[in-house]
Image: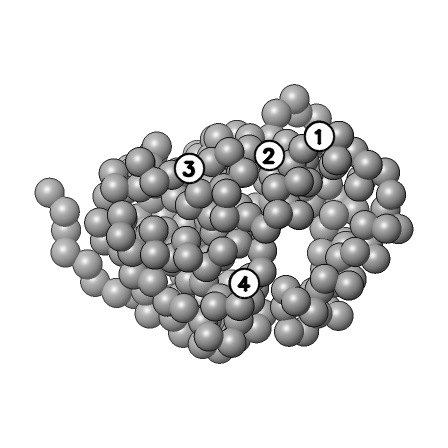
Amino acid sequence: MEALKNQYRCYALDFWGFGESGKRRTTYQVSDFVDLVEQFMDRLGIDAAPVVGHSMGGTVAMSLAINRPERVKRVVAVGSPVVGGSLHLFLRLAGVPWIAAIVWNMPTALKLGIKLFSPYIVKDWQEWYEMITRDISRATLESFFTSIHSLHKTDLRAQLARVQCPVMGIYGVRDNVVNPNQADLIKEIAPLARVRMMTDSGHFPMLDEPEAFNEQLAAFLALKFPVRT
C-alpha cells in the first residue's frame, strides 16, 4: 500500500472473524468473504476496482471476479489456491473441526509449532512470527477452522475461464504453504492471465522480495489490456 499510494487510493479490510472485523457469525466460508468485499465496496461507493489478495484473499478476489465481474477491473492473486488441495497437509488438517479445536486449545504448542515452521515460510521470520501470532490471537476458533475447511473444498478451475478481467498470479518458488503450481492453472485457464514466479520467495513474496514484488504489482496495475467485447 505504501508503494502504490501515490498512484492509487488503497483500502485493506479484515475478513469476518479475523483482525478488527466482527466475529459474531455462524459461517466463515469463502463465499461469505466474497460478499464481505462487495459490501465493503458498496459502503465506500466503489463501483469497480482492482482487487489484490494474498493466500485465501487471492482466492476470494478470483471468486469475486467470477461471481461479480462488473465489480472487478483486474485481479492479483499472491500465493493463492485455485484448488484447495494445494494447501499444505497441516493446513488441510487444521480445517478438520476436532483437530482445529485441539490445536486452538493448546495455544502454547500452537505458537511453538508456528515458530519452528516460520523459517521455512518467510526469510525474515522473527518479524513475521510476531505478526502472525498477533493475528491469530484476534481470530476465533470458528473462523479459524471454518475458513480453512472452506478453502480446502474450493475448486475454481471450472469457473476461472469465465473471468473477464486481467488476472495476475504471483507465486514464490519456495512456497511451503500453497503449492506454487497453482500459477500454472491461472496461466492455462484465465483468458487474460499473467504469472510471475519469485525465485527467492516463499509464501510471502511481498516480504521476501518487497522491491521486486512491488514493481511487478505496479507494472501489472498500470498495464493496458485490450477491451473485451
Task: Determine which residue is flagged by label 4.
Answer: 175
In the displayed structure, 116 sits above or below 32; it is below
Q: Quadrant of the C terminus?
A: top left
Real-space CA distance between mark 4 and mark 1, rounded to the nearest whole angstrom: 25 Å
Please tell me how crowded label 1 is: few (under 14), some (14-19), or many (20+) other residues with Cα within 10 Å. Answer: some
Check whether the beta carbons of the residues at disc 4 and disc 3 lie within 8 A of each other: no
Task: Determine which residue is flagged by label 2.
Answer: 149
Q: What's under tag 3, amino acid-wise? A: Asp
Real-space CA distance between mark 2 and mark 3, rounded to the nearest whole angstrom: 12 Å
Q: 198 or 69, which lies in front?
A: 198
Check whether the beta carbons of the residues at disc 4 and disc 1 lie within 8 A of each other: no
Q: Could you say where residue 75 lies in the image, as x and y percent from the top left?
A: 36, 51
Real-space CA distance between mark 4 and mark 3, rounded to the nearest whole angstrom: 19 Å
Task: Determine which residue is flagged by label 3.
Answer: 155
Residue 128 image-quadrant placement: bottom right
Q: Secondary structure at mark 2?
A: helix
Residue 72 in view here: yes
Q: Could you say where residue 16 lies in the image, as x and y percent from the top left?
A: 62, 35
Please tell me how crowded label 4 is: few (under 14), some (14-19), or many (20+) other residues with Cα within 10 Å. Answer: many
- Of the two numbered discs 2 and 4 on the same chain, state the one appearing first in sequence: 2
Real-space CA distance between mark 2 and mark 1, rounded to the nearest whole angstrom: 8 Å
Q: 157 or 4, which lies in front?
A: 157
Check whether the beta carbons of the residues at disc 2 and disc 1 lie within 8 A of each other: yes
Which residue is most to the left? 229
Check whether the beta carbons of the residues at disc 2 and disc 3 lie within 8 A of each other: no
Please tell me how crowded label 3 is: few (under 14), some (14-19), or many (20+) other residues with Cα within 10 Å. Answer: some
Q: What's under tag 4, amino acid-wise? A: Asp
Task: Determine which residue is flagged by label 1.
Answer: 97
33 sits left or right of 70 in the view:
right
Residue 142 image-quadrant placement: top right
Query: Number of callouts in the render?
Result: 4
